[in-house]
């Protein structure tokens, strides 16, 4: 149970920060409200028809979003137990920013095309391999995903598990 605490704290923090930043970014850029943003997330599985859905579709998007936050946090936790985090804060910040960039790259060039392929199987839609995320999403992933995960994991890591970097 003790190992779950940093994972759950970081996942909730990242989930809230990331979706808030995405809503602000897409609200300013395109005038989208939070429900529209969450329906867009659900569109990863449901296709473009998700945008016509209602509250239930947005709830699916929210569940997908927090599932992804929990997944990437758990992966970081597992990696941080194999490869100890630096003791110095600047090292933790660097690791967090690198992890945020890696999550962005995997989402943009792996998960999104994979979901497009999966969607094509049951919705008979074309497979799209155009990266769906832009530069603002990279910034969001750096500071609202990777960095908070690294800082929470550093806070909960036993001092003996940190390396002097």
Image (spheres, grey):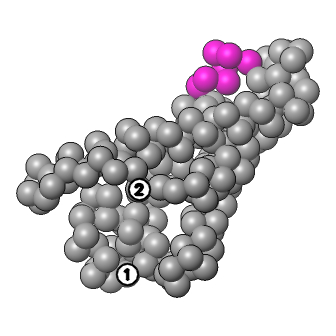
Q: Could you tell me which quadrant the N terminus lies in?
A: top right
Q: Which region is colored magenta?
A: 78-84
In the picture, measured across the screen, residue 12 lies left or right of residue 131, that is right
The answer for how far apart the CA atoms under marks 1 and 2 are is 23 Å
Rendered location of residue 101, percent (x, y): 61, 39
Rendered location of residue 34, percent (x, y): 51, 78
Rendered location of residue 152, percent (x, y): 76, 41
Secondary structure mostly seen in the magenta stretch: helix
Q: Is residue 98 above or below residue 78?
A: below
Disc 2 is placed on an element classified as loop
The picture quadrant where one finds residue 164 is top right
Crowd around label 2: few <14 · some 14–19 · many ≥20 (10 Å)? few
Residue 79 falls inside the magenta stretch: yes
Name the residue at 23% across, 74% down.
49
Name the residue at 19% across, 50% down.
127
Q: Which is more toward the observer, 96 or 157?
A: 96
Any mark on residue 132, and which? Answer: 2
The picture quadrant where one finds residue 93 is top right
Contact between marks 1 and 2 (CB within 8 A): the answer is no
Q: Is residue 49 above or below residue 74?
A: below
In the picture, measured across the screen, residue 38 lies left or right of residue 27, that is left
Q: Is residue 92 above or below residue 149?
A: above
Any mark on residue 55, and which? Answer: 1
Rendered location of residue 33, percent (x, y): 51, 83
Q: Is residue 148 above or below residue 49?
A: above
Q: Is residue 163 visible?
A: yes
In the picture, measured across the screen, residue 15 lies left or right of residue 117, that is right
Residue 105 falls inside the magenta stretch: no
Name the residue at 66% across, 61% down.
17
Q: Could you tell me which quadrant the C terminus lies in?
A: top right
């Amino acid at each position: 149970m003790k190992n779950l605490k940093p994972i759950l704290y970081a996942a909730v923090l990242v989930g809230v920060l990331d979706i808030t930043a995405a809503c602000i970014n897409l609200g300013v850029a395109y005038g989208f409200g939070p429900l529209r943003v969450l329906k867009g997330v659900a569109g990863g599985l449901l296709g473009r028809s998700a945008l016509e859905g209602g509250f239930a579709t947005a709830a699916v998007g929210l569940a997908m979003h927090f599932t992804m936050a929990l997944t990437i946090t758990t992966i970081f936790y597992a990696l941080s137990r194999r490869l100890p985090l630096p003791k110095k804060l600047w090292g933790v910040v660097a690791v967090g920013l690198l992890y945020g960039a890696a999550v962005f790259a995997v989402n943009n060039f792996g998960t999104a095309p994979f979901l497009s392929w999966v969607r094509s199987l049951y919705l008979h839609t074309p497979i799209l391999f155009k990266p769906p995320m832009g530069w603002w999403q990279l910034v969001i992933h750096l500071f609202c995903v990777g960095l908070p995960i690294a800082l929470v994991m550093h806070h909960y890591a036993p001092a003996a598990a940190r390396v002097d970097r």
